[in-house]
Image (cartoon, rainbow, N blue to C red):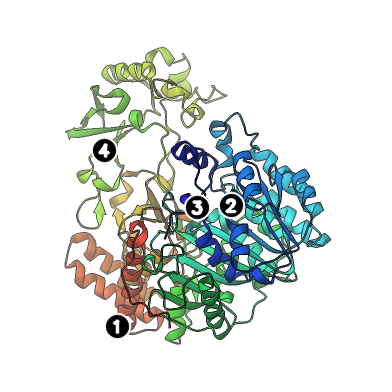
Amino acid sequence: MRPASDAVPEPGRAAAAERRKRLGQYFTGTGLGRLLAALAQAEKARTIVDPMAGSGDLLASCIEIGADPEALAGIEIDGAACDALEARLPAAQCVRGSAFDPDSVAKLTARAWDLVIANPPYVRYQSFSDKADASLALPSAMQVRTGLLRSLELLPALDAEDRRLFAHLVSGYSGLSDLAVPSWILCAGLVRMGGRLALVVPESWLTRDYATIVHYLLFRWFDIEFVVEDEHASWFEDAQVKTTLIVAKRVKRRASALSRPEGATYSHIAVSAAAAGPESPIGRIAIPSGPGAEKNFAKQARLWLRNASNHRAGLVRARPVSIKQACRNVVANASRQKWFALMGEDKARAPEGVYVPHEIHDWLAHRGMAPVFETLEAQGVAVGQGLRTGANGFFYADGERHGDKVALSFSGPLAGLSAQAPLDIAKPVLRRQSELPDGFVVSPSTARGWALDLRAHALPEDMDPGDLVSAPREPMPPDLAEMVRAAARANFGTSEKPLRVYELTAVSPNVRAASKGAPARRWYMLPDFAPRHLPDVLLARVNSATPRAYLNDGRECLVDANFSTLWTLPASRWSAEALLAFVNSSWAQAVIERSGAVMGGGALKVEATHLRRFPVPRLDDGQLAELAALGGRLLRGEGADAALAFIDAVLARALGCDSEGIEELKEIARAGQSRRAKHNRKRGGDHGDEVC
């Protein structure tokens, strides 16, 4: 398949590619565009718009599959791309400007559209000021949000209540979102009743917390029809993440996102890279090639959708996905977010914050099991993230313990410096995965990293006369004091933009003026440690394999933010050992594998948000005691494989399955790992040439 970036030749391609990267532009190409347009039945649309039109790939794709709309339009902020669109499609209206400017929306020939098709930009608009060039007036985060709120009043596809609820969504989306999130909301508002929304989106939209608001919008105002997966991350040569196509049909606003029958499904389709021909991502499958290939594929896809059928052979695989379960998962995620309380959902119908991945849901349904799940937090287990110092090059050091002192050696801006620190200052810390030991336990005896805890000490020159009275702060040991002074002089920025350590945004908040009964806090004093920094159990946030859980022996080691952390609360029935056993079970591994966020290189990211919504079957006191004993065996290194098998047996009883079911869970986890491994393969394996 021809790379999307080659769809429109242009001089100075390297410079143009850099420009597109700065703007978050990944132009679709007409091969992929025809596939999306065909799935969205563009040939039936009387009006078609692309609010982020680029050089017109998606609009041209609609024409290529036979669309002959009365109105064809695009909005594009980049003048060079807009010029290309106008030259390519003279009949199309091209509005130059930001799609989030109400004036741009007002210039469109229509305000409600049969088909809204788009490949939104994937860039943090918060950083536009660093990315802009002189020819573009790019909107700020505030302008995007404010403009989108104003644009809602121009959209006749939304009634008064729709606009009120959309306004809550616009006001409520995370400031950490990329520009795609407000783009999706705008596109959804432009679709007329009965029309279709067709989007190119990164696969991360399926699992990222910031996209929950868009999932909710789709399930309440749309019928999702297709999610088409780029199985081998091959559709965009210059993008590092897998891509999906989304097609959804606009319906009347539902009373609730959960207002779905149990049997309703959408079709999830995975397309292998080996299916691609020179001009299309489905060019090699066994249907007639040429201009009608994508329409023929879309016809087959609609049969899969209509019949809720599985297709597991050939270069394309399809499976039905329960919309009811997808809605439950979205509401479970959304219920923790502030905007959800404003959406008028019936709280009695909302799930208890539990997320069950589709593969796990299908496995439970296939086996006829319906266990009751609760969250970890409902069972007295808290979830968080480890310590973020803001300046690891200062607060962390390598070290060797000698009696009651640690010989510290520093790196980065402080390379070459060393100091002796007593154990009340040097605290063992687990900084990164490479420091994880063999087995299942971390402890001070295995620590290679040490954190500087200077909360009870100060430089002599920083001590006020009242310090020894109001709080027993001691003068810093002399060699540590010299190291701290050297750190204050060092450059923690770059040669172009030098920064002192106390100027770093995550370090400067450490400084607090003295108050009644409390001395001043200095930049070299970390905030007080929380239980999430000294947890019972930890697992890496970014993993090539499904992560292993480790116990923090006696909660003695600090744990860095590279790890997600869990700890038992005082009233919990769980012990640390039981928690260790549970998180290493095949049940937990399969759920983690299928609910974590897949990153561009195929790594699995497991955040605290994923663990907070983890489905935990109800375990009685006897089962928890068994898990605790088996967790103890893991800690002592007593036959780990046998202990893990016994752990799975305990979970099998709680779930209501047998040993065969556990093997199926293991296969679900392995299949997830295999799927992730395909991310960086630009060519898929040849599974045969038959579609059906």
The mark closer to the camera, 3 or 2, is 3
Mark 3 or 4, nearer chain start: 3
Amino acid identity at mark 1? Ser
Alpha carbon distance from label 2 to label 4: 43 Å
Q: Viewer-proximal residue, 3 or 21?
A: 3
Q: Which residue is mark 1?
A: 659
Instruction: Indicate the quadrant containing the C terminus: top left, top right, bottom left or bottom right.
Output: bottom left
For image coordinates 44% across by 74% down, the residue present is 359
Going from N to C along the chain, the mark reached first, 2 or 4, is: 2
> What residue would you read off at disc 4?
449
Q: How far apart, in angstroms, are the residues tagged by discs 1 and 2?
A: 46 Å
Q: Secondary structure at mark 3?
A: loop
Sooner in the amino-acid sequence: mark 1 or mark 2: 2
163 to the left or right of 376 = right
Relative image position of residue 391 (x, y in whole percent): 39, 31
> Real-space Cα distance between discs 3 and 4?
51 Å
On the image, numbered disc 2 is attached to which residue? 120
Residue 307 against residue 249 in the figure, above or below:
below
Is residue 529 visible to us here?
A: yes
The kind of secondary structure element at disc 1 is helix
Circle 3 crowding by C-alpha within 10 Å: few under 14, some 14–19, many from 20 = some
**Front position in the image: 538 or 414:** 414
Near mark 4 (Cα within 10 A), the count class, few <14, some 14-19 or many ≥20, is many
Dot 2 crowding, Cα within 10 Å, few <14, some 14–19, many 20+: many
Q: Position of residue 61 (x, y in %)?
A: 58, 61
Amino acid type at image mark 4: Gly
Residue 257 visible in the displayed image: no
Quadrant in the rendering for residue 625? bottom left
477 over 263 or under it: above or below: above
User: What's the CA distance linking mark 4 and mark 1?
Assistant: 41 Å
Disc 4, SS: strand
